Image: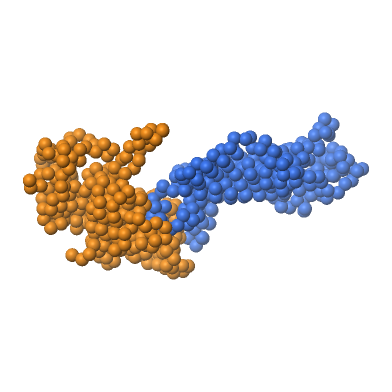
Amino acid sequence: MPPRTLHPALRELALTVRILSRNPSAVMGGTIIAAMVFLALFAPLLAPYDPVRLSLPDRLLPPGGGHFFGTDELGRDIFTRVLYGARISLSIGLLVISVAGGIGALIGATSGYFGGKIDSVVMRVMDVILSFPSLVLALALAAALGPSLVNAIFATAFVMIPKFARMVRGEALAVREMPFVAASRVAGAGHGFIIRRHILPNCLNSAIVLATLTLGDAILIAASLSFIGLGAQPPTPEWGAMIASGRKFLMDQWWYATFPGLFILATVIGFNIFGDALRDVLDPRIRR
Amino acid sequence: MSEPLLLVANLCKAFPLGGGFFGGGKRLLKAVDGVDLSLSRGETLGLVGESGSGKSTVGNCILRLLDPDSGSIAFDGVELAELTGQALIKARARMQVVFQDPQSSLDPRMTVGGIVSLPLRVQGRARGRELRERAAAALSEVGLGPECLDRYPHEFSGGQRQRIGLARALVADPAFVVMDEPTSALDVSVQAQILNLMAGLQQRRGHAYLFISHDLTVVRHVSRRIAVMYLGAIIETAPTDALFTHPAHPYTRALLASVPLPDPRKRRNLARLTGDVPSPVDLPPGCRFHPRCPEAMAVCACEAPPKVSLAAGHDVVCHLHSSG
C-alpha cells in the first residue's frame, strides 16, 4: 500500500508509473523519449562543436575521426546539429501539442457539454478541417503565412485542433450525463465549474494518450514543412531542413541526410509506442 | 399539520420521441402526467412504482434537472417551476439528491474531500481549511473517518461510496433530499445500514426525504406516507400503515401481493397481474390501469377515474371507490 502522506494526485501518478514500468513497449518508447529529452537538454555539453560555425576545409567529411556523423557541405558537424535539432523538434512538438490540445479540449468540452445547435456548428467546422489531409492543410496555411518557424508551429497546431476537439467532445457527451454532474448542478454549480472540474478532468486520460500519439505526427509535420522550406530557416539546425539540404548529396554523402532522418524516425516511433502503451495502462478497466 | 415544505401540483413532463425525419408524426412519451405531491418538514414520503412509471422523472423535475412542461413546484414558499439561472441556484440551495449508483454519482477524478465539500464550495459558503473541516464533519456523521478525505472514490466499497454520497447531500444542511433509489444497487446487509443511517440523520437534522424506490419493503421501512405511481400518475396515496393494511387501488393490491414472503410455507392467493404495462406513448383511454385491472368495469375504459379521499391522507384514483 502506498504511503498516505503523499498528495493524492501524486499517488495516482506513482501508480501509473509503476504499471507503465511493467509494460515492455512503454519501457521501450519511454527509453527512446527519455534519451531524446536527455540529448536535447544537454546538447551544449554533449556536442563537440558549434552547430552553426562554418569550417569549409572540413566539408562533407564521412563519419569517423572527430565527427561521429560526418560533416555537411559547409563543414558543420552533423552530430552537433542533430543534437541541437532534438531541442528544436521536441520543443516544436510540445508547443504544438499544448496549443492544439488546450484549444481543442476547450472547444470539445464546451461543445459536447452544451450540445444542440452550438455543438452541430462547431463540429461541422472541425469536420471541414479534418477533411483535408493534415499535411496539405498545414502546408497551405504555412505558405499563406510566410516561411518561418513560428508560422510552421501555428499551422501544425491548427490542423491538430480538430483531433482533440472531436475526442474530448465525445467524452464530454458521456460525462455530462453522469449522475455526479447532476448532483453538482443540484448543489448549485454553474456551467463553467462543471466544465472545468468535471468534464475536462474526466477527459484528461484520453487527451494525454492522444497528445502522446500525435506528438510524433506533430514533429513529422513540422519537419516536413521545414523540409519544403516553409519552417525553420537556415542556419537553424532543424532535422527536416537538414534532410532537405542533405538530399542533394544523398548519392555520394549518405550520412548527411540519413542521421537527421534516423532521429526523426526514432522520435516518432518512440512517441507512438509509448502512447499506445499509455492508452492501455490508463484504461480504468484494466487498471484495477 | 403545518404548511408543507414541498407542494407539487399537476406536474407534467413529456419527452418528444424522434418522430419522422421531416418533423411529421412527432409523438410524445408522457413520463409524468399530472402528479400532485406534498411533503412536510422532517417527513419521508415514499414514491413507489415499477420501472418506467416516471418516479425518477418526478424527482428530477422537482430538482429541476429536467424542466417540467407544466404544473407547479413550490418549495419553502418559492415557486421553482419557472425559475432559471441564479434565482434557481439560490432557491435550490436547500435541496439535495442521492442517486442510485454510488459508482457514477461520485466524480472519479475528485478526492472524497473535494466531492463532499463541493456544495459548500459552489455556494460560496466556505473556503480553504473550513471546507475540509466541514467535509470531515459530514463524513464522521456518516461513519467515515477524516483519513478518507484524500482518497479517491474507487478506493471505497459500494456501501462506503453511498455514505460519501450521503455526506455530500447533508454537508450544506438541506431541508429536503431526493433519494433516488439510494439502496437499490447495494447488498441487502449494506442496504439496512444505509437506511438506518438515513433515518438517524433525519432525526438529528430534520431533513425531509422524497424516497423513490421500486422496493416496497424498503419504502415501508423508511416512509411515513407512500405514493404509488403507475404510468406517470399517482394512483394512491396513503399513510404507510393504511396502505399496507387496506390497499384501495387494485394496482396497489397487486403490488403488495408481489412482495415475496420470507416464509416459504406461507402461501397467499396471488392477485397476479397479466399483460404488460401499456406504452406511455399511447395511454389507454379512461383509467390508465384498466387493460390489466382484475376488477375493471365498463366505465373504466372510457372515463378517467376521479380522486377519492377515503380517510385523512388516504387518496385513491379509482372508479371502485367513487360513489356514483
Q: Residue at x 50, y 41 (%)?
A: A120
- Number of numbered discs overlaid on the protein picture: 0
Q: Position of residue B294 (x, y in %)?
A: 12, 38
Q: Residue at x 71, y 46 (%)?
A: A151
Where does residue B89 sit, x and y in percent of width and height?
39, 60
Task: Please state if A251 lies on the left or on the right of B59 as rendered.
Answer: right
Tell me: residue A157, above or below residue B121.
Answer: above
Q: In this rendered view, identify the residue nearer to me: B218 or A186.
A: A186
Q: Is residue A100 left or right of residue A121?
A: right
Residue placed most toward the observer, A274 or B89: B89
Taking the spot 67% from the left edge, 36% from the top edge, the residue there is A136
Residue A89 visible in rendering: no
Q: Which chain is orange?
A: B
Position of residue A19 measured from the top left corner of the image (x, y, whole percent): 53, 47
Tell which of B128 and A274 is nearer to you.
B128
Image colour assigned to chain A: blue
Residue A105 is situated, as x and y percent measured from the top left of the image, at: 55, 48
